[in-house]
Amino acid sequence: MFLLPKYDSFWLFLLIASLIPVSAFSISKILAPVSQGPEKLTSYESGIEPMGDAWIQFQIRYYMFALVFVIFDVETVFLYPWAMSFKELGISAFIEALIFVLILIIGLIYAWRKGALEWS
């Protein structure tokens, strides 16, 4: 037997959760002042008159450094739940986590040798 009335609170929550952002954006669109002009199209630099073009090309080392940071930041997200349930998981989970960390260390050594961690 399918009991749809049990989900009334869920549907109400879903409706309210959908209406709040839609109404906020709609009210903002209606009430916000619209001003167009050359000042609106300039880049903001702390109130100082911008110099040069806002579209500059960044060097690849910034992206490589950020990528290495993200990889090792995500590593902690994967290792934290494992560390919290270490006693219940047993030796096989320990070996799996050790292999995971070993792969990351190999990746770190590779990035180090390629010069991705140098900031010159």
Image: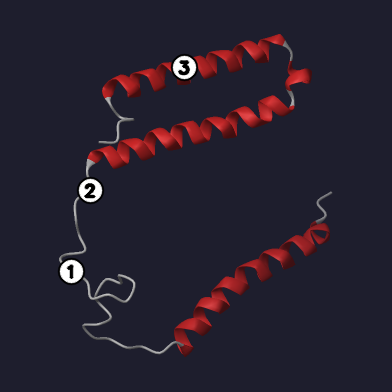
Secondary structure under tag 3 reads helix
Residue 32 in the image, given as x and y percentages of width and height: 44, 87
**In the visual, does 107 lie left or right of 100?**
left
Secondary structure under tag 1 reads loop
Residue identified by numbered label 3: 103
Choose mark 3 or mark 2, whichever is in front.
2
Residue identified by numbered label 2: 58
Q: Amino acid at mark 2?
A: Phe
Q: Amino acid at mark 3?
A: Ile
Q: Which mark is residue 51?
A: 1
Q: 85 above or below 15? A: above
Residue 89 in the image, given as x and y percentages of width and height: 74, 18
Q: 113 above or below 17? A: above
Q: 56 above or below 99? A: below
Mark 2 or mark 1, which is nearer the start of the sequence?
Answer: 1
> Which residue in the rendered view is the most extreme toward the front?
120
Residue 104 in the image, given as x and y percentages of width and height: 46, 21
Task: Decide: few, some or many residues near mark 2? Use Cα within 10 Å; few <14, some 14-19, many ≥20.
Answer: few
Secondary structure under tag 2 reads loop
Residue 116: name its quadrant: top left
Mark 3 or mark 1, which is nearer the start of the sequence?
Answer: 1
Task: Decide: few, some or many residues near mark 1? Use Cα within 10 Å; few <14, some 14-19, many ≥20.
Answer: few
Spatial CA span between label 3 and label 2: 30 Å
Choose mark 1 or mark 3, whichever is in front.
1
Spatial CA span between label 1 and label 2: 17 Å
